[in-house]
Image (cartoon, helix red, strand yellow):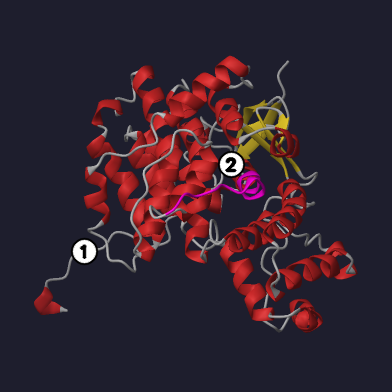
Amino acid sequence: MTEAAQFALSGKELEYPVLSGSVGPDVVDIRKLYAQTGAFTYDPGFTSTASCQSKLTYIDGDEGVLLHRGYPIGELAEQSTFMEVCYLLLNGELPDQGELDHFSHTITRHTMVHEQLAQFFRGFRRDAHPMAIMCGVVGALSAFYHDSTDIHDPQQRMIASHRLIAKMPTIAAMAYKYSVGQPFLYPDNSLSYTGNFLRMTFGVPAEPYEVNPAVERAMDRIFILHADHEQNASTSTVRLAGSSGANPFACIAAGIACLWGPAHGGANEAALNMLHEIGTPERIPEFIARAKDKNDPFRLMGFGHRVYKNYDPRATVMQKTVREVFEALNVQDPLFETALRLEELALNDDYFVEKKLFPNVDFYSGVILSAIGFPTSMFTVLFALARTVGWVAQWNEMITDPDQKIGRPRQLYTGPTQRSYVPLTQR
C-alpha cells in the first residue's frame, strides 16, 4: 500500500499520497487540497514546495552533493568539458565521440548572430550595464529567429535550444565590447566554445589573439560549475514564463532578468567587493572579528550557502583552479593574496567551521574572473552564459511534462475586505 499523509482540517480527515523520487526527500501530493478543503498551503519563497518533477539536477545541501543526470559535479568539472555537459543536460547521457563532434559542430555553426543585431546594440547607451543589454538582446532574438519559436514542434525546440547555447557567448562578448568602445569580433569556428568566447571578448582586429590554455580551462570549469542548479529563482522564472507558452527566447530573457538580482547572480561580485574593502592580508583578523560581531552589519560574502549546509562541492574545484590561473598569469596582487589568506583562516576558525560558513563557488569565481581581466559588471553576464544550458534543458523538460500546467501561485490575502466606492466629492 502506498504511504499516505494524514491531514485534518475543520473536522475533515483526508489522506494525500506521498511520492518518492529516485533520491532525496519524499513529497506530499497536495494537488487536490483546495478542491477538497477550500484551503491553500502557505510557503513563502516555495522553499518547502516541489513545483515540478525533474530528471536533470539533484542537490543534497546537507551532504554537499550536486549531481547532473547522476554525475557528481566534481567529476564533470575535472574530467569533462562544457560541451559534454551541455549534451548531457540536454540529452540525458554523456555523448560518445561521434555524438560530441556532431553536437559541437552544430553549436559552432550557430555562434554568429544576425547582422542587424549590431545595430540593435548601438541603441543602448555606452554606459549601460551589460546585464541590461543581455536582457534586451536575448528577448529580441525571437524577432530575428521566429522560425524556431513554435514550442509544440520538437525540431524547432531543438534548433532554438542550440541557438541559445551557441549565441550567448557572442552576445555576452558583444555586450562587453560595446561597453568599452571596441569593435565586435566575429566568432572563430576553429576554436573551442570557451576559447572562442575569450577571443571575442579580449581579442582585437589589429592583432592575433592567442588563447591561454590555463585560462581557457578555468573558464570552461566555471561554465560547467554554473550550468544548472536545480529549481533556483532564475530557473523557476524560466519555467514559470514557459508555462504560459511563451517562446524560448522570451523565457531565457526572463531568467536573465531574475539572475541579475544581487541575491542570486551577483554574489561573486559582492565577494570581490568585500575583498577590495579588506584590502590587504594584514586587515583580515579585523574583518573576521567584525563578521563574528552580531551588532556589526559586516558580513563575509562568498561564505556559506542557502542550500549547501556543508562544503559547496563546486568550491572544491574552484579552489584548485584559482591557483592554476594565478600561476599561469603570474598574478601578483594583494587582492588575490588576501583571498587565499582569508580562505585559509576561515577554514581553520572554529566559529566558521561550527556554523559551516565554508567558502562557496562565488568566493572563488569572482577572484578568478578578476584575475583573467573581466570587470565586475561582466560577472553576472558570465553566469547567465553558463546557466543558459540549464535553463534550456529545464524549459525543454517542462514543455514535454504531461503534468505541466500554467503556473498560478496562490496567496494569503491580508488587505481590506469588500467596501463601497465613495465619490471624490465626499472624501
**Would residue 168 be counted in the magenta stretch?**
no
Please state if 288 lies on the left or on the right of 15 as rendered. Answer: right
**Which residue is more in the foreground, 324 or 272?**
324
**Above or below, comparing residue 154 to residue 321 in the picture:** above
Please state if 73 lies on the left or on the right of 102 as rendered. Answer: right
Residue beneath disc 1:
420
**Which residue is more in the foreground, 287 or 205?**
205
Quadrant of the frame with the N terminus:
top right
Closer to us: mark 2 or mark 1?
A: 2
Disc 2 and disc 1: Cα gap in Å?
38 Å
For disc 1, the neighbor class at 10 Å (few under 14, some 14 to 19, many from 20) is few
**Above or below, comparing residue 227 to residue 330 in the picture:** above
| SS state under label 1 | loop
**Image coordinates for residue 211, horizontal then vertical, percent:** 56, 47
**Above or below, comparing residue 8 to residue 286 in the picture:** above
**Would residue 215 be counted in the magenta stretch?**
yes
**Which residue is more in the foreground, 150 or 160?**
160
Residue drawn where x is 81% and y is 81% of the image: 285
Amino acid beneath label 1: Ser
Location of residue 100 (image quadrant): top right
Point out the stretch of residues depicted in magenta. Answer: 207-218
